[in-house]
Amino acid sequence: MNLFDLTGKTALITGGNGGIGYGIAVGLAEAGAKIIISARNKNKTENAVDSLKSSGHQALGIEVDVSDESSIKNMVSESLNNAGQVDILVNNAGIGIRKLPHEYDLDDWNQVININLTGSFLTAKELHPHMKANGGGKIINIGSMTSIFGLDWAVAYASSKGGVVQLTKTLSVAWAKDNIQANTILPGWIHTELTQGIKDNFSDRYDHILSRIPDGRWGEPSDLAGAAVFLSSKASDYVTGVSIPVDGGYTSF
């Protein structure tokens, strides 16, 4: 038996049309899963789905705004109607607004919290009855290094990602009886559109970060695939409520 084989499984990945989400989508697809990519940008989602299909994988795209509960309900309903089941949920959709705490207004704060934290909760909550009826499932929430430590220009982002870890722990306890495992991946400094601005506009900060990574490089979205496959597979059936850093050793010291 291949503990990491995802053949016959369906994975729903929010924000899966680029960056970390797409890196995870490719990894799960290569392990055999059917992929549902759900995101706001319809054109970008279509391109991601086409790319997966061109590599021989099963994939479809659904438009969603995870800050809107009705949109989440529609996403889950459409996913089930198209795929018949959702075995794996990856709550990856997220944004960041780079400002110091005293520069934030309430609208900035609410936007980040609603997408990064509330959206993850609502999506998991909406899928729970289906996963329970289906005999179990896997929930992977995407946290951050800022789930562990603070970052001066990311007050709402760090707060949301700290909340994601506690959300995951609570779901793992509440839904263990339903054979649902919930875990968090904590990505390190990964080359994505979200972090490109650091490299382009703050080269000193970029180089300082690089100097602190024991592996000697920034990560790529594909580096998240292994942890995601593990947490989606039978290999992790007795693993729940944990947070796994994938950061090249950055948080080790």
Image: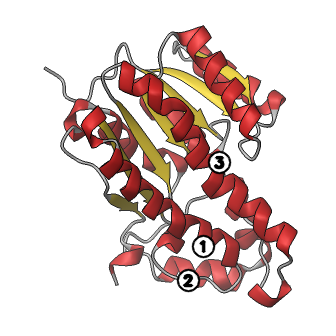
**What residue occupies the far bottom of the structure in this picture?**
102
In the image, residue 44 above or below residue 112: above
Left or right of 173 in this view: 84: right
Q: Is residue 133 left or right of residue 65?
A: left
Q: Which mark is residue 177?
A: none
- Residue 60 visible: no
* Residue position for label 1: 158
Compared to residue 131, the image places residue 213 above or below, namely below
Residue 229 sits in quarter: top left
What is the secondary structure assignment of the residue under circle 3? helix
Vertical order, 194 against 21 (above or below): below
Residue 206 screen position, x and y as percent: 63, 77
Crowdedness of circle 3 by 10 Å Cα count: few (<14), some, many (20+)?
many
Q: How many marks?
A: 3
Identified by mark 3, the residue type is Gly
Mark found first going from the N terminus, 1 or 3: 3
Per the image, the residue denoted by label 3 is 119
Work out whether residue 228 or residue 162 is closer to the camera in this orientation and state it.
Answer: 162
Residue type at numbered disc 2: Gly
Of the pair 205 and 227, the residue shown nearer to us:
227
Q: Viewer-nearest of labels 1 and 3?
A: 3
